[in-house]
RNA sequence: GCCUUGGUAGCUCAAUGGAUAGAGCAAGGGUCUUCUAAGCCCAAGAUGAAGGUCCGAUUCCUUCCCAAGGCACCA
C-alpha cells in the first residue's frame, strides 16, 4: 500500500529533478498521521523541497498533486504548512481483511532480514544465585526481540553466556562450604562478601543428601586459586595446555568441588526459572570452554600480533582508547591472571567467527561504560563497529508498600523473578516488562500488581481476544458460521469504526518492521493496546451479530482478522490469548 | 571532576524532526433488559530552565539544574 503510494509520489516529483542540479532529491517519507483527519498517510516532501526550490511549500504541493496519480488514493489534499495528506479508498482497506485471514499466523511477518544470521545474547546472569526481577526484564526484552526478529526473517540464535570463571565463583564456593559446614553443626564464620541468600542453604542440603559429611575436611587449603581466580596465562601460556592448567587448579583447591556443585545447581535453578518464564535459549555458552579451547590465549595472541594488545608496567593492555574508549584497559594482570575483558574478547571473536552478521548483547544499564571498549574490540578483530549492537536494560525499581526495595545479591535481600512471576503471573509480568523502553527506568509496584492485577493492561488486551471468541461462540449458537471469505460482501464494512480498525490492523506490519529496525520491542504492547481499544469501542457501539446476515458475516470476518493480529502479537510477546476470561 | 541514560498530567509511561504532545492508574460524572461492565462515554490535567539550528523541536546542538548509573591490574 505504502509502496504504491511512494512510487506515485516519486513519479510526480520527477520534474523537480533538473532544478536540483543533478543532486538526489530528498527521500520520500510517508508517515501515518496521529489523527485520521490528516489523512491515512501523509508526506512532507513539499516542505523538504521548498528551501531548495525557493518556492513556498504549499505551491510545490499543488504542483505535485497536479501530476499525481495513484489508483488506491481516493483523495489527496494539502494541509497545514504544506503536508500532502492521502486518503485511501475504502475498497483498498476492505481488501486487507481477506489478506489477513489468508496469512493467519504469518500476518505481520516478512523477509526483512533475508535470512541473515543474527545472534542475541541475553540474561547471562552469573550462576551465583536465582534470577532477580531485573534479570527478568532483560529476559523478556531479549526473548520478545528475538521472536520479532525471527518473525521478520532473520535467522536468530539465542544464547546465554555463563560466567563460570572468576572471583565470584570462588566466593560462591566458599559460601556454599560455609553453609555446608553449618549444616553439619560446625561453627563457621560466613565469608566476607559471601552470598548470604537462603538459597545456598538449600543447595547445602542437597549436597549433604548426596555426599553426607564426607566433605567436612575438604577445601581447607583453597585460597582463591584455581579456575575461580582466573587462569595464570602469562607464564604458563607457552608451556602448558589450558586444560592441564585447569586440572592442576582443581587439585590445588578442593574448594573446586563446592564451586562446581553450587554452579551446577544454581544454573539449573536459573534454567528452570527461564523455562517457566517462557524464555528459550538455543545455547548455553560456558566461559570455561574459552579457556579449555585455547581461544582466550589465541585471541590475545592475535591482538598482540596486531599491536592492539601491548605490555606496559608488567601488564598487558588493550589499546581501546583510540576508538572511543576513555583509556586503555588491562587484559592480563601483573599476576598473570586474565581479566573479564580477555574472556569477552575471546567470546565475541567466537561469535563473529560463527558467521553472525549482527551480534546483539543485552546488558544491564550498569554496564554501559563497557560499550566503547567492546565496540573497540569488535573493530580490532576486523568487524564493523555497528555489527555489535548493545541494548541496555535499565534497572527495575521494585516498589513495595510505597518504598523502594534495595536490590543486589550482596545485600541478600532481593526479589526474585520466581517470586514475581508466581505472584503476578507470567503473562502480566512479561507484558509489564515490555511496556517501557528498555533503557528507561521501570518502576514495578509489586503490591499494586498483586492487589489490582485485574487493572493490568495485559488483561485489557486479552479481554479483547476473549470477547471476540465469545462472539464466535454466540454466532455458532445462532447458526451463523464464518463464511468463506470470497462469499462475503466486505463492502459492507464501511462505518468509521470498522475502517479505523482495519487501518490499525494494517499498522501491525509497520510496527513489527519498526521494531526489527530499531530493536525496541516495547512498541508492540502499545500497538496491541491501541488495536484493542478500537475494538472495544466498536464492540460497544455496533453489534456484530444482527438480523442482517450478510452484514454479520462481514463483521465476523473483521473480528476474525482482529483476533489473528491479537494472537500474533500476544504470541510474539510470549503471552497467552485466552478464549474466555 | 569526567562519561552514559533519564527529566513529559497527582503517579507510571508513549510520541521514525511534524499539524491540536497520547495512554493507563488515581481523582470527578455517566453507562449492564441488548454478542463478556476485566468494557464504553463525558470532563479535568504535562514537555526541568535558558539559548541555538530549522518552514516546524518533547525529539538535534550548547549551558545550567535534578535523578539513577558508570568511571579498577573487580565481575
Image (cartoon, rainbow, N blue to C red):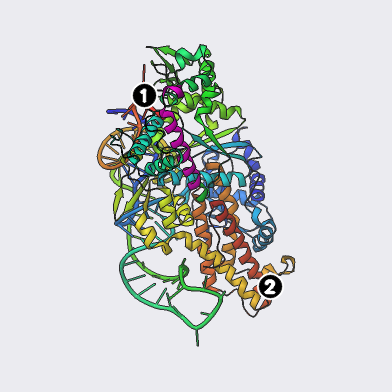
Residue in the foreground of this view, choosing between A438 and A445: A445
Q: Residue at x 51, y 61 (%)?
A: A461
The residue identified by callout 1 is A221
- Is the Cβ of the residue at disc 2 closer than 8 Å to that at disc 1? no
Q: CA distance from mark 2 to mark 1?
A: 77 Å
Rendered location of residue A459, percent (x, y):
48, 62
Examine the rendering and report whether any part of residue A99 can be seen: yes
Examine the rendering and report whether any part of residue A520 can be seen: no
Q: Residue at x 68, y 70 (%)?
A: A482
Element class at badge 2: loop
Splitting the image into 4 quarters, where does residue A192 fall? top left
Using the image, name the chain to which the residue with label 1 belongs: A
**Residue A267 belongs to the span the image colors magenta:** yes
| Precedes in sequence: disc 2 or disc 1 | 1
- Please rate how many residues cluster around mark 2, counting C-alpha atoms within 10 Å: few if below 14, some from 14 to 19, many from 20: some
Element class at badge 1: loop
Rendered location of residue A334, percent (x, y):
38, 15
Q: Residue at x 40, y 52 (%)?
A: A419
How many circles with numbers are drawn on the protein? 2
Point out which mark residue A8 bears: none
The overriding secondary structure of the stretch rendered in magenta is: helix
The residue identified by callout 2 is A481
Start and end of the magenta stretch?
A249-273
Instruction: Say yes or no: labels 2 and 1 on the same chain.
Output: yes
Height in image: A46 above or below A216?
below
Amino acid at each position: 500500500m505504502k509502496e504504491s503510494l511512494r512510487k506515485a509520489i516519486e513519479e510526480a516529483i520527477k520534474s523537480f529533478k533538473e532544478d536540483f542540479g543533478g543532486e538526489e532529491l530528498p527521500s520520500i517519507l510517508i508517515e501515518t498521521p496521529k489523527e485520521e483527519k490528516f489523512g491515512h498517510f501523509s508526506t512532507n516532501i513539499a516542505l523538504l523541497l521548498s528551501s531548495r526550490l525557493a518556492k513556498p511549500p504549499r505551491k510545490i504541493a499543488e504542483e505535485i498533486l497536479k501530476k499525481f496519480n495513484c489508483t488506491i488514493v481516493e483523495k489527496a489534499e494539502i494541509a497545514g504548512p504544506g503536508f500532502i495528506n492521502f486518503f485511501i479508498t475504502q475498497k483498498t482497506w476492505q481488501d486487507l481483511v481477506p489478506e489477513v485471514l489468508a496469512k493467519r499466523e504469518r500476518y505481520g511477518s516478512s523477509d526483512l532480514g533475508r535470512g541473515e544470521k543474527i545472534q542475541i545474547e541475553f540474561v547471562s546472569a552469573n550462576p551465583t544465585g536465582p534470577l532477580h526481577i531485573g534479570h527478568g526484564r532483560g529476559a523478556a526484552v531479549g526473548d520478545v526481540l528475538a521472536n520479532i526478529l525471527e518473525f521478520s526473517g532473520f535467522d536468530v540464535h539465542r544464547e546465554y553466556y555463563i560466567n563460570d570463571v572468576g572471583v565470584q565463583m570462588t566466593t560462591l564456593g566458599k559460601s556454599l562450604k560455609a553453609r555446608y559446614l553449618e549444616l553439619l553443626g560446625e561453627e563457621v564464620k560466613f565469608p566476607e562478601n559471601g552470598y548470604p541468600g537462603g538459597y545456598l542453604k538449600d543447595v547445602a542440603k542437597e549436597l549433604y543428601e548426596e555426599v553426607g559429611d564426607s566433605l567436612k575436611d575438604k577445601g581447607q587449603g583453597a585460597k582463591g586459586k584455581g579456575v575461580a581466580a582466573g587462569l595464570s596465562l602469562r607464564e604458563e601460556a607457552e608451556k602448558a595446555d589450558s586444560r592441564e592448567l585447569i586440572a592442576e587448579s582443581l587439585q590445588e583447591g578442593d574448594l573446586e568441588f563446592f564451586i562446581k556443585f553450587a554452579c551446577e545447581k544454581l544454573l539449573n535453578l536459573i534454567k528452570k526459572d527461564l523455562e517457566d518464564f517462557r524464555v528459550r535459549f538455543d545455547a548455553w555458552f560456558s566461559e570455561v570452554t574459552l579457556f579449555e579451547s585455547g581461544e582466550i590465549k589465541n585471541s590475545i595472541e592475535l591482538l598482540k600480533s596486531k599491536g592492539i594488545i601491548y605490555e606496559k608496567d608488567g601488564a598487558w593492555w588493550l589499546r581501546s582508547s583510540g576508538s572511543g574508549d576513555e583509556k586503555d584497559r588491562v587484559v592480563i594482570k601483573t599476576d598473570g591472571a586474565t581479566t573479564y575483558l580477555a574472556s569477552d574478547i575471546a567470546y565475541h571473536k567466537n561469535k563473529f567467527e560463527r558467521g553472525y552478521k549482527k551480534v546483539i548483547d543485552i546488558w544491564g544499564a550498569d554496564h554501559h561504560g563497557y560499550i566503547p571498549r567492546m565496540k573497540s574490540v569488535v573493530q580490532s578483530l576486523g568487524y564493523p563497529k555497528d555489527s555489535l549492537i548493545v541494548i541496555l536494560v535499565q534497572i527495575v525499581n521494585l516498589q513495595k508498600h510505597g518504598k523502594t526495595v534495595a536490590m543486589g545479591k550482596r545485600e541478600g535481600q532481593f526479589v526474585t523473578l520466581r517470586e514475581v512471576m508466581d505472584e503476578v503471573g507470567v503473562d502480566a509480568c512479561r507484558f509489564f516488562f515490555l511496556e517501557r523502553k528498555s533503557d528507561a527506568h521501570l518502576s514495578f509496584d509489586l503490591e499494586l500488581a498483586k492487589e489490582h492485577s485485574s487493572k493490568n493492561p495485559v488483561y485489557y488486551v486479552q479481554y479483547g481476544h476473549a470477547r471476540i471468541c465469545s462472539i464466535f461462540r454466540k454466532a455458532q449458537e445462532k447458526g451463523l458460521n464464518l463464511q468463506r471469505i470470497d462469499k462475503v460482501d466486505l463492502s459492507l464494512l464501511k462505518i468509521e469504526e470498522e475502517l479505523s480498525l482495519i487501518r490499525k490492523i494494517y499498522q501491525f506490519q509497520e510496527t513489527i518492521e519498526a521494531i526489527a529496525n530499531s530493536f525496541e520491542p516495547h512498541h508492540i504492547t502499545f500497538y496491541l493496546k491501541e488495536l484493542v481499544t478500537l475494538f472495544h469501542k466498536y464492540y460497544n457501539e455496533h453489534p456484530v451479530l444482527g438480523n442482517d446476515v450478510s452484514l454479520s458475516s462481514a463483521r465476523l470476518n473483521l473480528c476474525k482478522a482482529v483476533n489473528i493480529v491479537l494472537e500474533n502479537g500476544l504470541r510474539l510477546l510470549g503471552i497467552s490469548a485466552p478464549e474466555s476470561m
